[in-house]
Image (spheres, grey):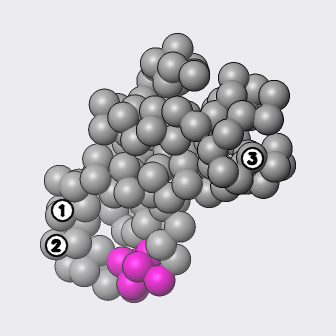
């Protein structure tokens, strides 16, 4: 069983606990594959905070585009971050936004690795 702290020590505690739950059913090889896919797809909470702060000084909604929320990004872009209220709320909740995005990406990375290795039932084939 792979240990998430050894593979990805940079994760936030909630995210680390979730990813460890995914890694419990994986072999070491699958865990390494998952780590490489997940690292390429996840977003750092600090990136979300910095891009949300751009809403005050530049273009509102950049953080929503970074998180894949294209519709909300366009809405923020054309309404100046919903008159800055939405941007303020997102600045406060930036960790939650990053966590929700990263959970979706972890699930997708898990599905990719399991489909590549043929390990659908949680048993190790290696």
Q: Residue at x 39, y 84 (%)?
A: 75
Q: Is residue 39 visible?
A: no
Q: Quadrant of the C terminus?
A: top right
Q: With 7 as the anchor, is 64 left or right in this view?
A: left
Residue labelled with disc 3: 119
Q: Nearer the viewer, residue 1 or 47?
A: 1
* Residue span colored magenta: 71-78
Q: With 6 as the anchor, is 54 left or right in this view?
A: left
Which of pointers 2 and 3 lies earlier in the amino acid sequence? 2
Q: Is residue 82 visible?
A: yes
Residue 33 is situated, as x and y percent measured from the top left of the image, at 74, 34
Q: Are marks 2 and 3 in contact (CB under 8 Å)?
A: no
Q: Residue at x 33, y 62 (%)?
A: 55
Q: Are marks 3 and 1 in contact (CB under 8 Å)?
A: no
Which callout, 2 or 3, points to the residue nearer the camera?
3
Q: Secondary structure at mark 3?
A: loop
Q: Nearer the viewer, residue 19 or 61?
A: 19
Residue labelled with disc 2: 85
Q: Are marks 1 and 2 in contact (CB under 8 Å)?
A: yes
Residue labelled with disc 1: 88
């Amino acid at each position: 069983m792979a240990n998430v702290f050894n593979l990805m020590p940079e994760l936030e505690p909630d995210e680390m606990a979730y990813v460890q739950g995914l890694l419990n059913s994986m072999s070491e090889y699958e865990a390494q594959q998952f780590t490489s896919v997940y690292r390429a797809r996840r977003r750092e909470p600090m990136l979300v905070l910095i891009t949300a702060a751009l809403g005050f000084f530049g273009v509102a909604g950049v953080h929503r585009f970074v998180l894949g929320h294209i519709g909300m990004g366009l809405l923020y872009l054309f309404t100046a971050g919903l008159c800055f209220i939405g941007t303020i709320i997102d600045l406060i909740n930036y960790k939650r936004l990053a966590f929700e995005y990263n959970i979706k990406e972890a699930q997708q990375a898990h599905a990719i690795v399991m489909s590549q290795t043929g390990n659908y039932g949680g048993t190790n084939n290696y």
